[in-house]
Image (cartoon, rainbow, N blue to C red):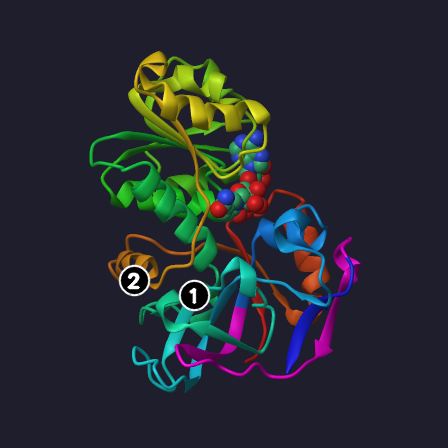
């Protein structure tokens, strides 16, 4: 089968499409013929070696987390899916390699693709939508009627976060660039702040949840924009001051007047994907696709993602 491999860390050019052995399934796994995958920024952070402490440096290394395809074989104890089922899912960090014609995956990391979604759209969802869902529901414990600000609302994660927060009954403020104001309004944002014209941390409003998919402000600046029981959740715990704030808000809550700072680390989950499928089926959420590339164009796809200006998701077509 064809798969994307790297034999060293580096720029997009280190990615090669090569012929490799088709993987063999273990008992709780299913073998998926992958039709589409999608690019997440973590893919190129792995490729360029920024995450080598987590990935190790054993080559050749596969890339890619998101899959949408059909079940072709089931392990002896796998019972949830049948041959031919259309499924989508996210691979886990230790078994990445979604940029490939076939993958093996535990059945508890998969869900059936809703009938109103094609395979191309389905591939756009897993990692980014799971991040937004797990951040808002598990870390943020979002409640109907709360106010939520999404920073980076037009990106892969943010475009799902706006829709998930809205579906949970929150009042959503979306922070995005000028070109994406209309897009985030159609996703259900009640209010939009153009980050090119206004800095939301300088405005008087406070929020019950600030979900940050950009990471361009410190918690100490953002904490002033949280209500008394406000929760800040970031996808990017980059700054030492932020990492310190995760510990301090947990250890000394009175000092922060009940405000909390936390970090989301997305996990594959078939049951969370099932909850997201329900939102899709009810037409309360839909993936936004910016561009599509073939497997052979994977270098261009990564280079585009690395601009930091994708509008929704970048999809990779793997097989027809
Ligand atoms: N920890 C985890 O589990 C986890 C999971 C998923 C993602 N992440 C991380 O979260 C980050 C976001 O992921 P993603 O998939 O959403 O990335 P993405 O799709 O590349 O996001 C790009 C978007 O960010 C917007 N943006 C750039 N600068 C901005 C600013 N200053 N204010 C507001 N919006 C801005 C861009 O809008 P413009 O074009 O208008 O600038 C663009 O729409 C990545 O760094 C990723 O690695 C972490």
Identify the residue at image location x=40%, y=84%. 74
In the image, residue 6 above or below residue 29: above
Left or right? Give the position of 249 relative to 214.
left
Task: Answer whether residue 11 is magenta in the image.
Answer: yes
Quadrant in which ligand 1 is drawn? top right
Q: Mark 2 — residue? A: 274
- Labels in figure, total: 2
Label 1 C-beta lies within 8 Å of the nearest ligand 1 atom: no
3D distance between C-alphas at marks 1 and 2: 10 Å
First-in-chain label (1 vs 2): 1
Q: Which residues are magenta?
A: 9-36
Q: Mark 1 — residue? A: 89
Left or right? Give the position of 80 relative to 234.
left
In the image, residue 182 above or below residue 283: above
Identify the residue at image location x=54%, y=80%. 320
Task: Answer whether residue 111 is magenta in the image.
Answer: no
């Amino acid at each position: 089968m064809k798969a994307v491999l790297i034999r060293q860390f580096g720029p997009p050019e280190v990615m090669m499409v090569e012929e490799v052995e088709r993987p063999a399934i273990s008992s709780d796994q299913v073998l998926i013929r992958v039709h589409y995958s999608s690019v997440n920024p973590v893919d190129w952070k792995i490729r360029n070696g920024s995450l080598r402490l987590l990935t190790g440096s054993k080559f050749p290394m596969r890339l890619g987390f998101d899959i949408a395809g059909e079940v072709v074989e089931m392990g002896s104890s796998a019972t949830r899916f049948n041959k031919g089922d259309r499924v989508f899912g996210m691979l886990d960090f230790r078994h990445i390699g979604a940029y490939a014609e076939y993958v093996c995956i535990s059945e508890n990391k998969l869900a059936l693709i809703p009938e109103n979604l094609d395979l191309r759209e389905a591939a756009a969802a897993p990692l980014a939508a799971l991040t937004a869902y797990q951040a808002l529901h598990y870390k943020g414990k979002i409640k109907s009627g709360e106010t939520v600000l999404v920073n980076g609302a037009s990106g892969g994660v943010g475009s799902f976060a706006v829709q998930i927060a809205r579906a949970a009954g929150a009042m959503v403020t979306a922070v995005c660039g000028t070109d994406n104001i209309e897009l985030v309004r159609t996703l259900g944002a009640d209010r939009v702040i153009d980050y090119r014209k206004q800095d939301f941390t300088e405005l008087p409003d406070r929020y019950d949840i600030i979900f940050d998919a950009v990471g361009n402000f410190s918690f100490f600046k953002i904490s002033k924009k949280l209500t008394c029981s406000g929760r800040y959740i970031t996808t990017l715990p980059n700054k030492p001051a932020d990492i310190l704030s995760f510990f301090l808000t947990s250890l000394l809550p009175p000092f922060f007047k009940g405000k909390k700072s936390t970090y989301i680390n997305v996990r594959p989950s078939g049951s969370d994907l099932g909850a997201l499928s329900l939102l899709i089926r009810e037409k309360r959420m839909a993936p936004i696709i910016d561009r599509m590339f073939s497997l052979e164009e994977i270098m261009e796809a990564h280079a585009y993602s690395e601009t930091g200006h994708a509008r929704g998701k970048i999809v990779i077509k793997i097989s027809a």
